[in-house]
Image: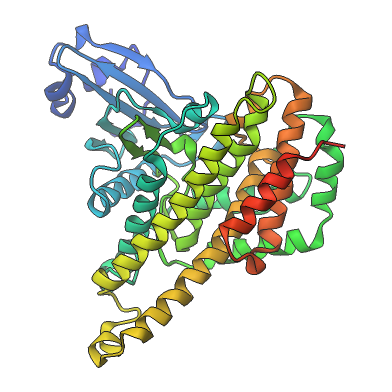
Amino acid sequence: MDSQVFEALSAETLPVRLGGNAAVTNRIGEDSHRWTISEVGDGNLNLVFIVTGEKGAVIVKQALPYVRLVGESWPLPLKRSFFEYHALTRQAQRDPGMVPEVFFFDETQAIIVMEFLTPHVILRRALIDGRTLPRVGRNLGLFVARTLFRGSDLSMVTREKKADVALFCDNVELCDITENLVFSDPYIEATLNRHTTPQLDPLVAELRSDRDLKVEAQRLKHIFSAKAETLCHGDLHTGSVMVTEDETRVIDPEFAFYGPISFDVGMLIANFWMSYFSQAGHETRPGARDDMRLYLLETIETLWDTFRSEFANLWRTERRGILYQASLFEDRRDPLAAEQALNIVIDEIWSEMLGFAGIEIHRRILGLAHNADFETIADPERRASCESKALKLGRHLAVNRQRIHSLRDIRATVERLEKEILA
């Protein structure tokens, strides 16, 4: 084949295409005829293969020139693999050991060969199954704090930060997906929207006629598009985290862009709240998953507390960028001024984080790309009940984000909503 012309991989062609690639053969074995290849991609966009040889296994991921969830009618540029590769390399530097190691990247063929994570499972699947993983909250809190702080003007040299912003600014098409599918389409009768049961129709109509909610969604979209604070993962949810009892790893940053520090944090925490409300659809009897519900609420608190604590630690020890320079504060023997500034920054992240969390909940129930947390609930009545409670929380978070001051307050709201019965 012509290596300068894109060609989608298949289980049959992959050994021929990559059989002479040292990055692959050094890790799994040189005899490509003995490779075992499984196509395991269950996402919306890409091909993903597990390739196993006599020496080991790797993941081969290839972007397709269209949205896999929809088909060739929705073209999408292959360059998203370029942004995923560059995001992974930066995240690996900023929080070592939290993303899969990259062995090879082919920009023309949109192929990334990376570490095969085993015996890891997707976090979303583990939560659906009712597994409690004690280290996830802390590990993810550290990851978002370190990657978001170290990718910002609080830490980076100005020239490197601005060059990075320019590089990731070209990830236009994937940002466009977020701007429309997350912030706008759920609040109108968009063609690609869907919700799973007619029982939700009255609530959906109410949300789409809610002026305060639609205005707040657009305010958050404004922040998303205009606030290039740091390199964000861009699609951080429980489906882009892989776990064991002891390890947490973050995958799939192809939506990476420079945006608000609060965005990744809000999107991630929203998925734990959705998991909480989905538990009633997966339990065999009422109350059977109360321990799981408690675990999820505690994990949310651990994640946020860890993020806030580590962000503050980095502020005090690694704040060498152009923002809030030590020459204005600590060097003038006024550390309290630096702490005052830190509190203001954290408060702004908190308020924005809540808004992004609320919008994420809405788009996962009303938009195109849904969560398996709800989708795997077979009984439509139970599913509608779970989703309605999540939708109400999403509205509360988005509209009241500047008046919510603690996770304790949100926890009380969540527990109250959980007791509601769908009208």
- The residue that appears at 60% across and 38% down in the rendered structure is 276
Above/below status of 156 relative to 281? below
* Position of the N terminus by quadrant: top left
Residue 191 in sight in this render: no
Where residue 329 appears, as percent x and y from the top left, is 30, 87
| Quarter occupied by residue 168 | bottom left
* Position of the C terminus by quadrant: top right
- The residue that appears at 71% across and 62% down in the rendered structure is 399
Where residue 327 appears, as percent x and y from the top left, is 25, 88
Residue 35 in sight in this render: yes
Relative to residue 294, is residue 401 drawn left or right?
Answer: right
According to the image, what is the colour scheme of the structure?
rainbow
Above/below status of 414 relative to 109? below
Depth check: give the residue in front, 237 or 57: 237
- The residue that appears at 42% across and 80% down in the rendered structure is 341
Query: Farthest top residue?
Result: 34
Where residue 30 appears, as percent x and y from the top left, is 12, 15
Above/below status of 340 relative to 379? below
- The residue that appears at 68% across and 41% down in the rendered structure is 367
Depth check: give the residue in front, 206 or 286: 286
Where residue 385 appears, as percent x and y from the top left, is 76, 33
Query: Farthest bottom residue?
Result: 332
| Quarter occupied by residue 159 | bottom left
Count of numbered badges drawn on the protein: 0
Depth check: give the residue in front, 383 or 44: 383
Above/below status of 126 relative to 344? above
Relative to residue 236, is residue 402 drawn left or right?
Answer: right
Relative to residue 297, is residue 331 drawn left or right?
Answer: left
